[in-house]
Image: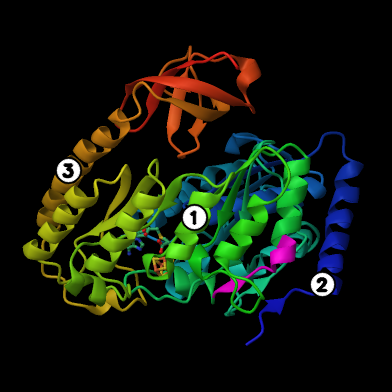
């Protein structure tokens, strides 16, 4: 089925709504202030930058303090229960602000809204929330806000859709030298634990021309770090005349001094050809985030992941043989329904064998509507907690071992601000996408700097700035 692209006429209409809102604020003395908070993954952060882009076009400035805001928006995440509960807590805390300032407009959008029972709970628990809209109507935000400002009442816009592609929405990026660029939306994989395919719709790829022209103009305006986003970038390109390795090759060939990162790679679609492209490239980061989730074939099957422990290990061997300085990271879920001690030990064993540079580890969280949420889950949460701590121990040891290897080596860092380990330090990321703190200065921010590593922490490297050659 062809992907539904939002028409130029519809986008033009939204631009008119933005102008109308702007013209009203224009006659007021001070511009209105917006507070926007995005929870969860990079895709959500990227959506948040588009919402901010539209608000900016409508004349809003931004504040970090909800108490000063005229408009508050929470862009939510539904991937695990604790993310959902955090949003409920934070939205609930806005009640007193609305009481003090009845003109305050409060909106909630994002993945939580796309789940029927959560949307219902939001609507009924928080009568003071004015606008609730889903992930498929981001481009209609100007119209929703316009209607709220001029007509009031509560607005719910949550279409049940496979999703659309909307090009040309303005973006207000948080950085001038780092940018994320979505290359695809949605997911077709239906891993049995995961809510994403239900709340983000079917997989749809932007055209390579749109992606390349966005990256080219970012680089021309001084951007040095481009993060390509998709739930499974390795399946990029369906319905276009290209695929992910080809897209990367074309981006790598663009003029300019910049880096390309991407996330996330699904192991089932990660080919040797993709690894060869990374190995042969000038600009692609030496970083592969390859979520394995679990080391037991029985559980991988139950998760519907479509690869085995053996095929994963083969892929890792190939990647490390082609890219010796590869930073390999992963995601692990502990306590999937039906997982037994033997399965978990297979995960520990795989972690020891691979020795990941770092890992995001999660305790399984049941999500309504997913297949796994209906599977028997006899292991107690105490037991799962114990396994989780064991896993962390193994990862802490492996991560330190990987980072130790950098001591004495010089890496190139894109400096992005003040240090995280010490006020005197500045920080950035190496081409392996590892955090490096070093003795830099304000003038390094936004520039590439060579740093000789003197010390490895579990999650970052510390080093000394080297004079340019
Ligand atoms: N599309 C990406 C990841 C999306 S969600 C991929 O396939 O790799 C990010 C991570 O959250 C997943 O890799 C998984 O480890 C974790 N996750 C997703 N659903 C979860 C659930 N129900 N409980 C616990 N962790 C979950
Ligand atoms: Fe979720 Fe699997 Fe899709 Fe990743 S690939 S978003 S884990 S369903």
Mark 1 or 2, which is nearer the eye?
Answer: 1
103 left or right of 378 in image: right
**Residue 26 % position (x, y):** 90, 43
The secondary element bearing badge 1 is classed as strand
Question: Which callout, 1 or 2, points at the residue further toward the start of the chain?
Answer: 2
When the figure is inspected, residue 247 is found, relative to residue 48, above or below; the finding is below
**Residue 237 % position (x, y):** 60, 72
174 left or right of 384 in image: right
The secondary element bearing badge 2 is classed as helix
Mark 3 surroundings: few (<14), some (14-19) or many (≥20) residues within 10 A: some
Along the line of sight, the residue nearer the viewer: 308 or 469: 469
**Residue 46 % position (x, y):** 60, 52
* Residue 10, label in figure: 2
Question: Which callout, 1 or 3, points at the residue further toward the start of the chain?
Answer: 1
Along the line of sight, the residue nearer the viewer: 276 or 300: 276
Q: Is mark 1 within 8 Å of ligand 1?
A: yes
Quadrant location of ligand 1?
Answer: bottom left
Q: Is residue 24 visible?
A: yes
CB of mark 1 within 8 Å of CB of mark 3?
no
When the figure is inspected, residue 161 is found, relative to residue 458, above or below; the finding is below
* Residue for badge 1: 263
**Residue 60 % position (x, y):** 77, 43
Mark 2 surroundings: few (<14), some (14-19) or many (≥20) residues within 10 A: few
Question: Which callout, 2 or 3, points at the residue further toward the start of the chain?
Answer: 2
11 left or right of 75 in image: right
* Residue for badge 3: 394
| Real-space Cα separation, disc 1 to disc 2, in angstroms | 30 Å
């Amino acid at each position: 089925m062809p992907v539904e692209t939002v028409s130029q006429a519809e986008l033009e209409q939204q631009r008119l709504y933005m102008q109308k809102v702007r013209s009203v604020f224009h006659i007021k003395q001070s511009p209105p202030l917006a507070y926007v908070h995005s929870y969860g993954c990079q895709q959500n952060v990227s959506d948040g930058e588009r919402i901010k882009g539209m608000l900016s076009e409508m004349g809003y400035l931004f504040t970090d303090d909800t108490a000063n805001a005229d408009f508050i928006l929470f862009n939510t995440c539904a991937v695990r229960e604790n993310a959902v509960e955090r949003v409920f807590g934070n939205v609930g805390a806005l009640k007193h602000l609305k009481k003090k300032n009845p003109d305050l407009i409060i909106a909630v959008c994002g993945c939580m809204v796309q789940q029927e029972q959560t949307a219902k709970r939001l609507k009924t628990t928080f009568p003071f929330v004015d606008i609730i809209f889903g992930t498929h109507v981001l481009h209609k935000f100007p119209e929703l806000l316009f209607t709220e400002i001029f007509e009031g009442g509560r607005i719910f816009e949550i279409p049940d859709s496979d999703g659309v592609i909307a090009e040309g929405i303005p973006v207000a990026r948080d950085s001038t030298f780092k940018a994320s660029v979505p290359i695809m939306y949605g997911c077709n994989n239906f891993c049995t634990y995961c809510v994403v395919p239900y709340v983000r719709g079917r997989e749809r790829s932007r055209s390579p021309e749109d992606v390349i022209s966005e990256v080219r103009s970012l680089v021309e305006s001084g951007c040095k770090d481009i993060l390509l986003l998709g739930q499974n970038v390795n399946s990029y390109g369906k319905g276009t005349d290209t695929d992910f390795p080809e897209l990367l090759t074309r981006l790598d060939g663009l003029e300019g001094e910049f880096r390309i990162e991407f996330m996330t790679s699904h192991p089932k679609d990660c080919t040797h050809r993709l690894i060869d492209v990374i190995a042969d490239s000038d600009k692609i980061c030496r970083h592969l985030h390859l979520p394995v989730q679990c080391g037991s074939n029985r559980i991988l099957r139950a998760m519907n992941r479509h690869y085995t422990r053996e095929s994963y290990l083969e892929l890792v061997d190939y990647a490390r043989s082609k890219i010796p300085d590869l930073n390999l990271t992963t995601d692990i879920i502990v306590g999937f329904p039906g997982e037994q001690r033997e399965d978990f030990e297979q995960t520990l064993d795989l972690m020891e064998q691979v020795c990941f540079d770092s890992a995001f580890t999660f305790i399984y969280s049941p999500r309504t509507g997913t297949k796994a949420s209906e599977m028997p889950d006899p292991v107690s949460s105490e037991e799962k907690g114990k396994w989780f701590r064991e896993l962390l121990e193994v990862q802490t040891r492996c991560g330190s071992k990987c980072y130790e290897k950098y001591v004495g080596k010089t890496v190139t860092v894109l400096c992005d601000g003040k240090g995280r380990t010490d006020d005197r330090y500045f920080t950035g990321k190496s081409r392996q996408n590892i955090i490096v703190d070093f003795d830099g200065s304000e003038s390094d921010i936004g520039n590439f700097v060579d740093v000789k590593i003197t010390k490895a922490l579990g999650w970052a490297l510390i080093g000394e700035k080297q004079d340019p050659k």
